[in-house]
Image (cartoon, rainbow, N blue to C red):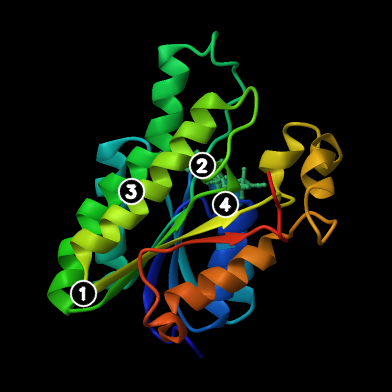
């Protein structure tokens, strides 16, 4: 088991990639803190993990809120007494054109997609530093490298996530390794909310693998980055996108 007894917080693990990451980590022996805002889905993920013999608890929080991030850490410490792995995965899409995006929408997207990762990292880093070891995996995007019409807030937030991940690696090393995964088109609820993979056929066409990814494709890489198998990989934003070229 690659993560035996390590305590992992996975944000946005009530759905999609985060759920797949939480399950994968639990299968590899981690004690997983499942989190998001939807209690029914959080409980279902924890039930699934426990049914497979794994260990997990859920904490319901809005990670875009600094006080909630503190609650998440406090409950993790109460339950498991430490944190070894943080996956900053929670995210939201925004499709307002640049000329129309409101300040409120812009700030919400940044709060969910970037600022939450900063707040949580500021909370867990002292614990990991003290232990002398820790791993952070952030969810960036192919939108960390390229833009498309109509996604300005999302694209900007994901570019920021790439920069934040590299900054974290520089400032938190050598004890804490930080990398980001940049998924391409992955079939999740987020994609279904805008018409499914069919509505994003241009992304499949621009990809030599000619398919959308599945959450497990991301979970496999998250496991690699969270485990000692990647012990000399740091500060990278790794595309997992089937070869997508924007
Ligand atoms: N799907 C893709 O093609 C794709 C591509 C590149 C990058 N990404 C990124 O991958 C990550 C995961 O997305 P996904 O595709 O798996 O989407 P998803 O199935 O919609 O999952 C999003 C997760 O984020 C959580 N979340 C959203 N806002 C939150 C908030 N304010 N506080 C706490 N949790 C919150 C949701 O939980 P609740 O609803 O329970 O709050 C849910 O668990 C995101 O960062 C996304 O930007 C996705």
Q: Residues within 10 Å of mark 4 (few under 14, many from 20)?
A: many
Residue 94 point in image, percent of width and height: 57, 27
First of labels 1, 3 by sequence position: 3
First of labels 2, 1 by sequence position: 2
**Nearest-to-viewer mark from 4 and 1:** 1
First of labels 4, 3 by sequence position: 4
First of labels 4, 1 by sequence position: 4
Above or below, comparing residue 152 to residue 68 in the picture: above
- Number of labels in the image equals 4
Please tell me the numbered disc located at residue 91.
Answer: 2
Residue placed under numbered mark 4 in the picture: 14
Task: Give the Cα separation between the discs numbered 2 and 4.
Answer: 12 Å
Please tell me the numbered disc located at residue 174.
Answer: 1
Mark 4: C-beta under 8 Å from nearest atom of ligand 1: yes
Residue placed under numbered mark 3 in the picture: 164
Helix, strand or loop for disc 3 = helix
* Image quadrant in which you'd find residue 171: bottom left
Q: Residues within 10 Å of mark 3 (few under 14, many from 20)?
A: many
Helix, strand or loop for disc 2 = loop
Task: Give the Cα separation between the discs numbered 2 and 1.
Answer: 28 Å
Q: Residues within 10 Å of mark 1 (few under 14, many from 20)?
A: some
Helix, strand or loop for disc 4 = loop
**Nearest-to-viewer mark from 3 and 2:** 3
Residue reaching furthest to the bottom = 1
Q: Residue at x 42, y 63 (%)?
A: 236
Residue 51 point in image, percent of width and height: 63, 75
Mark 2: C-beta under 8 Å from nearest atom of ligand 1: yes
Q: Residue at x 44, y 21 (%)?
A: 106
**Nearest-to-viewer mark from 2 and 1:** 1
């Amino acid at each position: 088991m690659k993560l035996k007894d390590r305590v992992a917080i996975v944000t946005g693990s009530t759905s999609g990639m985060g759920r797949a990451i939480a399950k994968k980590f639990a299968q590899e022996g981690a004690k997983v803190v499942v989190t998001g805002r939807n209690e029914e889905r959080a409980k279902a993920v924890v039930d699934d993990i426990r049914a497979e013999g794994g260990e997990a608890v859920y904490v319901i929080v809005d990670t875009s809120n600094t006080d909630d991030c503190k609650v998440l850490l406090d409950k993790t410490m109460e339950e498991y007494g430490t944190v070894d792995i943080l996956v900053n995965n929670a995210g939201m899409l925004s499709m307002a054109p640049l000329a129309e995006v409101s300040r409120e929408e812009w700030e919400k997207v940044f709060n969910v997609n970037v600022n939450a990762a900063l707040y949580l990292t500021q909370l867990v880093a002292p614990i990991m530093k003290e232990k002398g070891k820790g791993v952070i995996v952030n969810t960036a995007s192919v939108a960390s490298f390229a833009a498309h019409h109509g996604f300005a807030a999302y694209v900007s937030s994901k570019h920021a996530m790439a920069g934040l991940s590299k900054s974290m690696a520089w400032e938190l090393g050598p004890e804490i390794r930080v990398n980001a995964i940049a998924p391409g088109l992955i079939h999740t609820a987020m994609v279904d909310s805008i018409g499914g993979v069919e509505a994003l056929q241009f992304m499949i066409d621009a990809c030599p693998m000619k398919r959308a990814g599945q959450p497990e494709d991301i979970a496999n890489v998250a496991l690699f980055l969270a485990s000692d198998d990647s012990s000399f990989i740091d500060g990278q934003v790794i595309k997992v996108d089937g070869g997508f070229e924007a």
